[in-house]
Amino acid sequence: MPAPAMTENSTLPILFAPDKRLRLTARPIGDADGDMVRALAPKMLATMYAAPGIGLAAPQIGEGLRLIVLDIQPEEKPEPLVLVNPEIIAESAEAATREEGCLSLPGQYADVTRPARVKLRYLDLMGTKREIEGDGLLSACLQHEIDHLDGVLFVDHLSALKRNMILRKLAKDLKSQQRG
Ligand code: NI
């Protein structure tokens, strides 16, 4: 799919933690959702690129659907990926730790440990069954975005102490931004 036009008006507002909608389990996308999802996916990609970010899940823009978009190398050649109903079907026993951030927790970062390698099954926008396998940044990004579909944020992988520190810092940052 070609990269969407990155115009201002094609982007969607992103929800910030602790918005309760980020904590809901998203529903699977069915045949009847096809047209809606094909209209939504380019807007999600435009929103992700404009943020800028490398991944975005539908719950982050207030849509409780199992839909994620990502592009782990937007600086180079754009390679947008749209995953409908993604499911992890295999993961490595070996773990890897990377620093993660999230468009719903702007400005907050922490090291997160996850399986180093994952294999996913998903549908593309035409409803074709596909699989994707990755390690490194791609693996972390896929797992991070799938977490969003189950109401899980990257801070949930941290200790309660660290998580609360980050959430308090976020609330403070967002408040000072509002004040200008
Ligand atoms: Ni995120």
Image (spheres, rainbow, N blue to C red):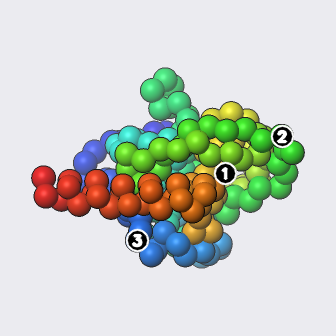
10 Å neighbourhood of mark 1: few (<14), some, or many (≥20)?
A: many
Distance in Å between CA atoms under marks 1 and 3: 21 Å
Q: Nearer the viewer, residue 35 or 149?
A: 149
Q: Nearer the viewer, residue 31 or 88?
A: 88
Q: Nearer the viewer, mark 2 or mark 1?
A: 2
The tag earlier along the polypeptide, 3 or 2, is 3
Quarter the N terminus occupies: top right
Q: Which mark is residue 143?
A: 1
| Residue indicated by mark 2 | 94
Q: Position of residue 139 (x, y in %)?
A: 69, 41
The tag earlier along the polypeptide, 2 or 1, is 2
Asked which secondary structure carries label 3, the reply is loop
- Amino acid residing under circle 3: Asp
- Amino acid residing under circle 2: Glu
The tag earlier along the polypeptide, 1 or 3, is 3
Q: Position of residue 75 (x, y in %)?
A: 45, 26
Which residue is pictured at 20% across the width and 55% down the height? 176
